[in-house]
Image: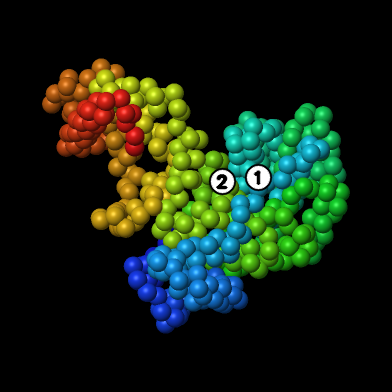
Amino acid sequence: MAFEGLSNRLQETIKKITGKGKVSEQDVKTMAREVRLALLEADVNFKVVRSFINDIKERAIGQEVMESLTPGQQVIKIVQEELTNLMGGEQSKIAVSDRPPTVIMMSGLQGAGKTTTTGKLANLLRKQYNKSPLLVACDIYRPAAIKQLQTLGKQLDMPVFEMGTDVSPVEISKKAIEYAKQEHHDYVLIDTAGRLHVDDTLMQELEDVKAEVKPDEIFLVVDAMTGQDAVNVAESFNEHLDITGVVLTKLDGDTRGGAALSIKAVTDTPIKFIGMGEKLDELEEFHPERMASRILGMGDVLTLIEKAQANIDEKQAKELEEKMRTMSFTFDDFLEQMSQVKQMGPLEDLLAMIPGANKMKGMKNVQFDEKQLISVEAIIQSMTKAERQDPSLMNASRKKRIAKGSGTNVSQVNRLLKQFNEMKKMMKQMTNMQKGKKGKGFQL
Ligand code: GDP
């Protein structure tokens, strides 16, 4: 997971100070030194680290803490607030033009994830904001890039505007906007050409497109895994183009996080979105405060709730509650539940969003074996409809058949049956508890 090293070190450091009834100047200095090292190790720009540490020291040694009844917690609050400020403070929202279409120009080096992000952004705009985006292919140097955007368009069932490789990007963008107006698209996402390095020809081309279409947003897509390089790239693009936002991709990898923590401070451009995987729904709006909480192990309940809301169908949830109450929960329901949870992303990432989960006994080193989930799915899928509805039908020969069909073995099938029965028992207990409360609804 991204930020793992930084997150562990910062949590170790602040743990030492949390419970203190009194925080001395020396305590703050020791903490500041450790935080400084943790940030440098996470590849945060050294100038950014210096000013960050000074801010923390100034506030933590000041009256805010010394006069507080819970000085330790006060210090952590300061670290959390300063981390939030470092990453931009408030969430920076995507522009909406009052004269649609809103035009967004996507820029970035080759391989940063620009084309994928263009598709993901279109998907997010439709799903979250009910918009109808038009994708525009302007990378005339790589026919493969046009093809890639078309493939994404097909997957999303969204139109892609292209004019091949013989027309200039300026002309293509101009025509694309005319087309978008005609067809009532409210967003135009222009996928421009990338290069391996920043070069003058590329910048000139982007500047020309900018001058022609006057975009409402110019996003720079950078790869978080490249650390300080991402920050340098952002600086040069910003000098030429005055970018309005950064999209940081590949934050699902084990990046140390330096880019996320330095970009806003170095370029004064907010991070607007983060890429959390290769799939088209793995783009998130960036919330500095939530990210700071995640880094400090305080969890990110808001993002978790949003993910649940986006992926779990309320009607189905109600039906499920009913089934739990009437004890008619079957393997089919179990399968449905699993697929909904899976849509929310890797379990490890979900766990990181629960406050204190990493401090729970035995949870710190839990590694979720996603393969095991796949076996569970295969086992259920190998059951007949009747078996799924009524597991008590299961006898030795049925179990053997299921194990064979799912590529597992009988003991795995037995284990799942046992777990399922235990789960049903637990549901029964929960519903009994609810009855005991006399009308007070069961709350998680
Ligand atoms: P472009 O050259 O900048 O247009 O880059 P592409 O969109 O072709 O992406 C390059 C590679 O990065 C592809 O394999 C993408 O699937 C991958 N990629 C893009 N965004 C993410 C992300 O957020 N996480 C991960 N893990 N991979 C990503």
- Asked if ligand 1 lies within 8 A of label 2, the reply is yes
- Density class for disc 1 (Cα within 10 Å; few <14, some 14-19, many ≥20) is many
Q: Quadrant of the C terminus?
A: top left
- The picture places residue 381, in percent across and down from the top left corner, at 32, 27
Residue situated furthest left in the rendering: 396
- The picture places residue 279, in percent across and down from the top left corner, at 52, 43
Q: Residue at x 62, y 64 (%)?
A: 263
Q: Secondary structure at mark 1?
A: helix
Q: Which residue is mark 2?
A: 283
Res 151 seen here: no
- The picture places residue 378, in percent across and down from the top left corner, at 31, 33
Between discs 2 and 1, the one toward the N terminus: 1
- Asked if ligand 1 lies within 8 A of label 1, the reply is yes
- The picture places residue 272, in percent across and down from the top left corner, at 63, 52
Q: Residue at x 23, y 31 (%)?
A: 433
Compared with residue 389, is residue 10 higher up or lower down, i.e. above or below?
below
Q: Secondary structure at mark 2?
A: strand
Res 308 seen here: yes
Residues at circles 2 and 1 in contact by the CB criterion of under 8 Å? no
Q: Which residue is mark 1?
A: 118
Compared with residue 379, is residue 304 higher up or lower down, i.e. above or below?
below
Q: Residue at x 29, y 35 (%)?
A: 376
Amino acid on which the number 1 mark rests in the picture: Thr
Amino acid on which the number 2 mark rests in the picture: Leu
